[in-house]
Amino acid sequence: MEIAVIGSNMVDLITYTNTLPKAGETLEAPDFAIGCGGKGANQAVAAAKLGAQVMMVSKVGDDLFAANTLANLQQQGIDTRYVTTMPGTSSGVAPIFVDDQSQNRILIVKGANDYLKPTDIDTAAEALKSCQLLILQLEIPLETVYYAIDFARRQGIKVILNPAPAVANLDIHYACQCDYFMPNETELEILTGLPVKTDEQVEAAGQSLLKRGLKNLIITLGSRGALWMHGTETYRVAPTPVNAVDTSGAGDAFIGCFAHSLIKTGDVAQAMQLASAYAACSVTRRGTQRSYPDAETFQRFHNVN
Ligand code: RIB
Protein backbone atom coordinates (compact mmCIF):
# COMPACT_ATOMS: atom_id res chain seq x y z
CA MET A 1 0.00 0.00 0.00
CA GLU A 2 1.29 3.49 -0.81
CA ILE A 3 -0.83 5.87 1.26
CA ALA A 4 -2.78 5.49 4.50
CA VAL A 5 -5.29 8.07 5.64
CA ILE A 6 -6.24 7.84 9.30
CA GLY A 7 -9.10 10.30 9.42
CA SER A 8 -12.64 11.39 8.96
CA ASN A 9 -15.47 10.75 6.60
CA MET A 10 -18.57 12.96 6.51
CA VAL A 11 -21.78 13.37 4.60
CA ASP A 12 -21.69 16.81 2.98
CA LEU A 13 -24.99 18.69 2.90
CA ILE A 14 -24.22 21.55 0.55
CA THR A 15 -26.55 24.54 0.23
CA TYR A 16 -25.80 27.04 -2.53
CA THR A 17 -26.99 30.45 -1.42
CA ASN A 18 -26.34 34.10 -2.20
CA THR A 19 -27.13 35.28 1.32
CA LEU A 20 -26.91 33.64 4.73
CA PRO A 21 -29.96 34.16 6.99
CA LYS A 22 -29.79 36.41 10.04
CA ALA A 23 -31.06 35.13 13.43
CA GLY A 24 -34.82 34.57 13.22
CA GLU A 25 -34.90 34.97 9.44
CA THR A 26 -35.96 32.38 6.85
CA LEU A 27 -34.42 32.65 3.41
CA GLU A 28 -34.86 30.55 0.32
CA ALA A 29 -31.67 29.14 -1.20
CA PRO A 30 -31.56 28.22 -4.86
CA ASP A 31 -29.83 24.85 -4.72
CA PHE A 32 -28.75 21.90 -2.57
CA ALA A 33 -26.62 18.78 -3.05
CA ILE A 34 -25.61 15.85 -0.88
CA GLY A 35 -22.24 14.21 -1.33
CA CYS A 36 -19.47 12.18 0.26
CA GLY A 37 -16.97 14.31 2.14
CA GLY A 38 -14.86 14.58 5.27
CA LYS A 39 -11.31 15.86 5.04
CA GLY A 40 -9.77 12.41 5.50
CA ALA A 41 -11.97 10.69 2.93
CA ASN A 42 -11.60 13.60 0.50
CA GLN A 43 -7.82 13.36 0.60
CA ALA A 44 -7.95 9.57 0.25
CA VAL A 45 -10.32 9.82 -2.72
CA ALA A 46 -8.26 12.49 -4.49
CA ALA A 47 -5.12 10.35 -4.25
CA ALA A 48 -7.01 7.19 -5.30
CA LYS A 49 -8.62 8.92 -8.30
CA LEU A 50 -5.13 9.78 -9.50
CA GLY A 51 -4.08 6.13 -9.23
CA ALA A 52 -2.55 5.83 -5.75
CA GLN A 53 -3.05 2.69 -3.67
CA VAL A 54 -4.84 3.99 -0.59
CA MET A 55 -6.15 2.52 2.65
CA MET A 56 -8.29 4.29 5.24
CA VAL A 57 -8.68 3.88 8.97
CA SER A 58 -11.96 5.58 9.81
CA LYS A 59 -15.29 5.21 11.64
CA VAL A 60 -18.77 5.37 10.17
CA GLY A 61 -21.96 5.73 12.17
CA ASP A 62 -24.67 3.24 12.86
CA ASP A 63 -27.07 4.78 10.33
CA LEU A 64 -28.29 4.95 6.74
CA PHE A 65 -25.30 7.01 5.60
CA ALA A 66 -22.68 4.39 6.52
CA ALA A 67 -23.29 1.91 3.70
CA ASN A 68 -23.11 4.68 1.10
CA THR A 69 -19.86 6.01 2.56
CA LEU A 70 -18.27 2.56 2.47
CA ALA A 71 -19.53 1.83 -1.04
CA ASN A 72 -18.19 5.17 -2.26
CA LEU A 73 -14.70 4.55 -0.84
CA GLN A 74 -14.67 1.03 -2.28
CA GLN A 75 -15.73 2.33 -5.70
CA GLN A 76 -12.59 4.45 -5.69
CA GLY A 77 -10.53 1.33 -4.97
CA ILE A 78 -9.74 2.37 -1.39
CA ASP A 79 -9.02 -0.43 1.09
CA THR A 80 -11.81 -0.13 3.68
CA ARG A 81 -10.97 -3.14 5.85
CA TYR A 82 -10.30 -0.74 8.72
CA VAL A 83 -13.30 1.51 8.24
CA THR A 84 -15.52 0.26 11.02
CA THR A 85 -18.95 1.04 12.44
CA MET A 86 -19.45 2.80 15.77
CA PRO A 87 -22.64 1.35 17.27
CA GLY A 88 -25.21 3.86 18.52
CA THR A 89 -23.70 6.93 16.84
CA SER A 90 -24.51 8.97 13.76
CA SER A 91 -22.10 9.31 10.87
CA GLY A 92 -20.23 12.59 10.62
CA VAL A 93 -22.15 15.26 8.73
CA ALA A 94 -21.10 18.62 7.36
CA PRO A 95 -23.63 21.33 6.51
CA ILE A 96 -21.80 23.51 3.95
CA PHE A 97 -22.87 26.89 2.60
CA VAL A 98 -21.42 28.06 -0.71
CA ASP A 99 -22.01 31.72 -1.56
CA ASP A 100 -22.21 33.53 -4.89
CA GLN A 101 -18.45 34.18 -4.73
CA SER A 102 -18.00 30.36 -4.66
CA GLN A 103 -16.58 30.61 -1.10
CA ASN A 104 -17.55 27.94 1.43
CA ARG A 105 -18.48 27.97 5.10
CA ILE A 106 -18.50 24.58 6.80
CA LEU A 107 -19.93 23.25 10.06
CA ILE A 108 -18.93 19.75 11.09
CA VAL A 109 -20.70 17.32 13.38
CA LYS A 110 -18.03 14.70 14.01
CA GLY A 111 -20.38 11.87 15.02
CA ALA A 112 -18.61 8.52 14.68
CA ASN A 113 -15.32 10.23 13.73
CA ASP A 114 -14.97 11.26 17.36
CA TYR A 115 -14.71 7.59 18.31
CA LEU A 116 -11.68 6.75 16.19
CA LYS A 117 -9.21 5.69 18.90
CA PRO A 118 -5.57 4.62 19.18
CA THR A 119 -6.81 1.01 19.45
CA ASP A 120 -8.12 1.34 15.88
CA ILE A 121 -4.55 2.08 14.81
CA ASP A 122 -3.32 -0.98 16.72
CA THR A 123 -5.90 -3.11 14.90
CA ALA A 124 -4.71 -1.84 11.52
CA ALA A 125 -1.01 -1.82 12.47
CA GLU A 126 0.16 -4.66 10.21
CA ALA A 127 -1.48 -3.12 7.13
CA LEU A 128 -0.28 0.36 8.05
CA LYS A 129 3.33 -0.81 8.30
CA SER A 130 3.39 -1.45 4.54
CA CYS A 131 2.50 2.20 3.72
CA GLN A 132 5.01 4.80 2.55
CA LEU A 133 3.01 7.85 3.60
CA LEU A 134 0.46 8.58 6.30
CA ILE A 135 -1.97 11.51 6.01
CA LEU A 136 -3.70 12.96 9.08
CA GLN A 137 -6.18 15.77 9.73
CA LEU A 138 -7.93 17.00 12.90
CA GLU A 139 -11.51 15.76 12.50
CA ILE A 140 -10.71 12.80 14.76
CA PRO A 141 -9.56 12.92 18.42
CA LEU A 142 -6.18 14.59 18.95
CA GLU A 143 -4.97 11.64 21.04
CA THR A 144 -5.45 9.41 17.96
CA VAL A 145 -3.57 11.87 15.75
CA TYR A 146 -0.66 11.96 18.22
CA TYR A 147 -0.66 8.16 18.53
CA ALA A 148 -0.58 7.84 14.74
CA ILE A 149 2.39 10.22 14.50
CA ASP A 150 4.31 8.21 17.12
CA PHE A 151 3.44 4.99 15.28
CA ALA A 152 4.61 6.38 11.92
CA ARG A 153 7.88 7.65 13.41
CA ARG A 154 8.64 4.23 14.88
CA GLN A 155 7.90 2.58 11.53
CA GLY A 156 9.80 5.11 9.40
CA ILE A 157 6.63 6.14 7.55
CA LYS A 158 6.49 9.72 6.25
CA VAL A 159 3.69 11.87 7.68
CA ILE A 160 1.60 14.74 6.31
CA LEU A 161 -0.39 16.56 8.98
CA ASN A 162 -3.17 18.81 7.72
CA PRO A 163 -4.18 20.75 10.88
CA ALA A 164 -7.79 21.14 9.79
CA PRO A 165 -9.98 22.27 11.34
CA ALA A 166 -7.36 24.24 13.28
CA VAL A 167 -7.22 23.89 17.05
CA ALA A 168 -5.27 26.46 19.04
CA ASN A 169 -4.09 23.79 21.51
CA LEU A 170 -2.35 21.58 18.91
CA ASP A 171 0.83 20.20 20.53
CA ILE A 172 3.64 21.65 18.42
CA HIS A 173 5.92 18.80 19.50
CA TYR A 174 3.81 16.42 17.37
CA ALA A 175 3.59 18.85 14.48
CA CYS A 176 7.40 18.94 14.46
CA GLN A 177 7.54 15.14 14.18
CA CYS A 178 5.69 15.32 10.86
CA ASP A 179 7.49 15.60 7.53
CA TYR A 180 4.94 18.03 6.06
CA PHE A 181 2.66 20.35 8.00
CA MET A 182 -0.03 21.69 5.64
CA PRO A 183 -2.49 24.35 6.90
CA ASN A 184 -4.48 26.80 4.81
CA GLU A 185 -4.20 30.50 5.59
CA THR A 186 -7.18 30.50 7.99
CA GLU A 187 -5.68 27.61 9.93
CA LEU A 188 -2.29 29.34 9.96
CA GLU A 189 -3.94 32.41 11.49
CA ILE A 190 -5.63 30.36 14.22
CA LEU A 191 -2.47 28.38 14.98
CA THR A 192 -0.20 31.42 15.23
CA GLY A 193 -2.59 34.20 16.28
CA LEU A 194 -0.95 36.32 13.56
CA PRO A 195 -2.59 38.13 10.62
CA VAL A 196 -2.36 36.47 7.18
CA LYS A 197 -3.91 39.03 4.83
CA THR A 198 -0.79 39.84 2.80
CA ASP A 199 1.95 37.58 1.42
CA GLU A 200 4.42 39.18 3.86
CA GLN A 201 2.11 38.43 6.79
CA VAL A 202 1.72 34.82 5.67
CA GLU A 203 5.51 34.41 5.50
CA ALA A 204 5.95 36.01 8.93
CA ALA A 205 3.31 33.70 10.44
CA GLY A 206 4.99 30.75 8.72
CA GLN A 207 8.39 31.76 10.08
CA SER A 208 6.97 31.86 13.58
CA LEU A 209 6.02 28.18 13.21
CA LEU A 210 9.30 27.17 11.56
CA LYS A 211 11.20 28.74 14.47
CA ARG A 212 9.42 26.26 16.73
CA GLY A 213 10.97 23.36 14.80
CA LEU A 214 8.66 22.43 11.90
CA LYS A 215 10.43 20.63 9.04
CA ASN A 216 8.37 21.55 5.98
CA LEU A 217 5.50 24.00 6.12
CA ILE A 218 3.24 24.07 3.07
CA ILE A 219 0.51 26.71 3.21
CA THR A 220 -2.39 26.50 0.78
CA LEU A 221 -3.62 29.98 -0.08
CA GLY A 222 -6.64 29.36 -2.31
CA SER A 223 -6.70 31.84 -5.18
CA ARG A 224 -3.26 33.11 -4.04
CA GLY A 225 -1.54 29.76 -4.77
CA ALA A 226 0.61 27.90 -2.24
CA LEU A 227 3.83 28.44 -0.31
CA TRP A 228 6.47 25.95 0.87
CA MET A 229 8.74 27.11 3.68
CA HIS A 230 11.61 25.06 5.06
CA GLY A 231 14.67 26.33 6.90
CA THR A 232 15.30 29.75 5.39
CA GLU A 233 14.01 28.73 1.94
CA THR A 234 10.64 29.62 0.45
CA TYR A 235 9.05 28.32 -2.75
CA ARG A 236 5.88 29.85 -4.11
CA VAL A 237 3.42 28.26 -6.52
CA ALA A 238 1.27 30.67 -8.53
CA PRO A 239 -2.43 29.87 -8.70
CA THR A 240 -3.93 28.34 -11.84
CA PRO A 241 -6.52 30.91 -12.98
CA VAL A 242 -9.98 29.33 -13.35
CA ASN A 243 -13.64 30.29 -13.02
CA ALA A 244 -14.41 28.89 -9.57
CA VAL A 245 -17.94 27.69 -8.88
CA ASP A 246 -17.40 25.89 -5.53
CA THR A 247 -14.20 25.94 -3.45
CA SER A 248 -15.38 23.27 -0.96
CA GLY A 249 -12.80 20.52 -0.51
CA ALA A 250 -10.17 22.23 -2.69
CA GLY A 251 -7.57 22.05 0.08
CA ASP A 252 -8.19 18.31 0.39
CA ALA A 253 -7.82 17.91 -3.39
CA PHE A 254 -4.45 19.68 -3.10
CA ILE A 255 -3.26 17.36 -0.32
CA GLY A 256 -4.44 14.13 -2.01
CA CYS A 257 -2.71 15.07 -5.26
CA PHE A 258 0.41 16.29 -3.45
CA ALA A 259 0.68 12.96 -1.59
CA HIS A 260 0.25 10.93 -4.77
CA SER A 261 2.84 12.94 -6.66
CA LEU A 262 5.29 13.03 -3.73
CA ILE A 263 5.47 9.26 -3.41
CA LYS A 264 5.84 8.90 -7.18
CA THR A 265 8.72 11.36 -7.61
CA GLY A 266 9.89 12.64 -4.19
CA ASP A 267 9.94 16.12 -5.79
CA VAL A 268 8.14 18.54 -3.43
CA ALA A 269 8.08 21.52 -5.82
CA GLN A 270 6.66 19.43 -8.65
CA ALA A 271 4.11 17.85 -6.31
CA MET A 272 2.98 21.34 -5.27
CA GLN A 273 2.63 22.50 -8.89
CA LEU A 274 0.47 19.49 -9.73
CA ALA A 275 -1.53 19.76 -6.52
CA SER A 276 -2.25 23.41 -7.16
CA ALA A 277 -3.53 22.63 -10.67
CA TYR A 278 -5.57 19.67 -9.36
CA ALA A 279 -7.22 21.87 -6.69
CA ALA A 280 -7.92 24.52 -9.35
CA CYS A 281 -9.60 21.93 -11.54
CA SER A 282 -11.74 20.80 -8.58
CA VAL A 283 -13.14 24.29 -7.96
CA THR A 284 -14.50 24.47 -11.50
CA ARG A 285 -17.06 21.84 -10.49
CA ARG A 286 -19.56 21.66 -7.66
CA GLY A 287 -19.16 19.48 -4.57
CA THR A 288 -16.19 18.06 -2.69
CA GLN A 289 -15.17 14.51 -3.75
CA ARG A 290 -17.41 14.58 -6.79
CA SER A 291 -15.52 17.61 -8.10
CA TYR A 292 -12.17 15.75 -8.10
CA PRO A 293 -11.01 14.71 -11.58
CA ASP A 294 -9.58 11.28 -12.32
CA ALA A 295 -6.07 11.04 -13.78
CA GLU A 296 -7.21 11.26 -17.40
CA THR A 297 -9.54 14.24 -16.88
CA PHE A 298 -6.85 16.01 -14.85
CA GLN A 299 -4.27 15.41 -17.56
CA ARG A 300 -6.57 17.06 -20.12
CA PHE A 301 -7.16 20.03 -17.79
CA HIS A 302 -3.45 20.34 -17.05
CA ASN A 303 -2.52 20.33 -20.75
CA VAL A 304 -4.49 23.51 -21.36
CA ASN A 305 -4.03 25.31 -17.99
O1 RIB B 1 -12.50 20.22 3.57
C1 RIB B 1 -13.81 20.03 3.15
C2 RIB B 1 -14.49 19.05 4.02
O2 RIB B 1 -14.57 19.58 5.33
C3 RIB B 1 -15.91 18.73 3.63
O3 RIB B 1 -16.00 17.63 2.77
C4 RIB B 1 -16.58 18.51 4.97
O4 RIB B 1 -17.05 17.21 5.12
C5 RIB B 1 -15.56 18.87 6.04
O5 RIB B 1 -14.96 17.77 6.58
Image (tube, helix red, strand yellow):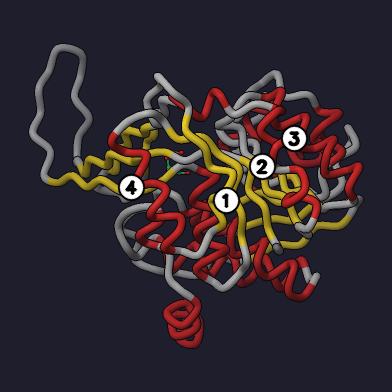
Between residues 75 and 274, which one lies in front from this camera angle? 75
Q: Earlier in the sequence, mark 4 or mark 1?
A: 4
Q: Earlier in the sequence, mark 2 or mark 1?
A: 2
Q: Amino acid at mark 1?
A: Leu
Ligand 1 within 8 Å of disc 3? The answer is no
Q: Amino acid at mark 3?
A: Asp
Please give the residue where the numbered disc 2 appears in the rendered image.
136
Residue at 61 percent of width and 60 percent of height: 54
Marks 4 and 3: in contact by CB < 8 Å? no
Please give the residue where the numbered disc 3 appears in the rendered image.
122
Ligand 1 within 8 Å of disc 2? The answer is no
Between residues 79 and 245, which one lies in front from this camera angle? 79
Tell me the distance, in whole angstroms, between the alpha carbons under discs 3 and 4.
26 Å
Please identify, in this view, whether the residue under mark 4 or under mark 1 is nearer the observer: 4
Please give the residue where the numbered disc 1 appears in the rendered image.
221
For disc 3, the neighbor class at 10 Å (few under 14, some 14 to 19, many from 20) is some
Marks 4 and 2: in contact by CB < 8 Å? no
